[in-house]
Image: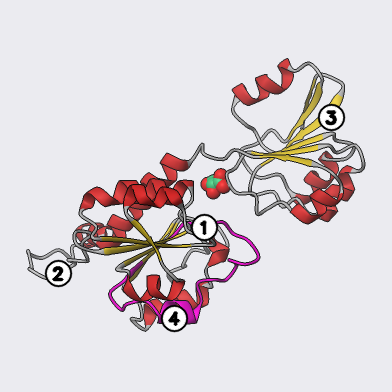
Amino acid sequence: MQTVGKMMKVFVTRRIPPEGMQILSSAGVCEMCVWDSDEPVPRTELLKGVQGAAGILCLLSDKIDAEVLNAAGPNLKVISTLSVGFDHLALDEVKKRGIRVGYTPDVLTDATAELTVALLLATARRLPEGVEEVKNGGWSTWKPLWLCGYGLSGSTVGIIGLGRIGMAIAQRLMPFGVKRLLYTGRTAKPHAAEVNGEFVPMDTLLSESDFVVLSCSLTPETQGLCNKAFFSKMKNTAVFVNTSRGAVVNQEDLYEALKNGQIAAAGLDVTTPEPLPTIIHS
Ligand SMILES: O=C(O)[C@H](O)CO
């Protein structure tokens, strides 16, 4: 662990870009303790590192719960997380202690939207399977219906969570000739008009969409939202894409839905755990 400077202790849970460290050090009031590694800080080191800290700068891989807050003690005034999501922070515990929270909304809006489009197209057009077939010699000749997949043109796309990222996804998908853009969430969004978005109940979105894109936050309400009942309402030809959080999906139910042909395909940027265990071929 590296310690730089003096005064208020700030525990930084990972090696972060030097520009960030520079901001902290130029404030001239921080004694920085850094877990100077690209790998996540082990829990025991996190509990040790936060002791007496006035600030914690963490990442989404660090679970900041009552145990960590207690280990930090009463000096802790602020937690800043280098992430868009903050579901790894026990917000009720944080609030109880009057600790302020900072996070980094919007920095990944474009990146996540681009990745979602990439994942949707790759999944719908079966690119990973195609690449695999080229590599293993399975591509014998051109066959009209082989690995055709599904097209976006004329389709209905349903976005669950039309926030900043959901909107950025919609804006990128519409030029592909999407016919209807459905969305659902807590409330209708005035900005949905920019993409001709139709606010619909969840069940309508699931039964009418050719592509279901998950772009909501992980909260107690959305945890496990995509379960057996959810997938059973989707079309058999529908493609499911998740770039929100793995825990919004019940993976056993997703696996069953894919295995039983309840849905056509899934493109996943996020899983529980991350990464998923690899298959060992014997
Ligand atoms: O919350 C975030 O910042 C993103 O999910 C990181 O990938």
Please tell me which residue is depicted at 52% across the width and 61% down the height of the picture: 271
Q: Is residue 92 left or right of residue 85?
A: right
The answer to whether residue 117 is above or below residue 72 is below
The three-letter code of the residue at mark 2 reads Trp
Q: Position of residue 226 (x, y in %)?
A: 50, 72
Q: Which residues are magenta?
A: 213-239
Mark 1 and mark 2 residues within 8 Å of each other at the beta carbon: no
Mark 2 and mark 3 residues within 8 Å of each other at the beta carbon: no
Q: Residue furthest right?
A: 74
Q: Which residue is mark 2?
A: 146
Alpha-carbon span between mark 1 and mark 4: 23 Å
What SS does tag 2 mark? loop
Alpha-carbon span between mark 1 and mark 2: 34 Å
Alpha-carbon span between mark 2 and mark 4: 24 Å
At label 3, counting other C-alpha atoms closer than 10 Å, the crowd grade (few under 14, some 14-19, many 20 or more) is many
Q: Quadrant of residue 145?
A: bottom left
What SS does tag 4 mark? helix
219 falls in the magenta region: yes
Q: Position of residue 160 (x, y in %)?
A: 45, 62
Q: How is the image coloured?
A: secondary structure
Q: Which residue is mark 3?
A: 9
Along the viewing direction, whichever of 141 and 200 lies nearer the viewer: 200
Q: Which residue is mark 4?
A: 256
* Discs 1/2, front: 1
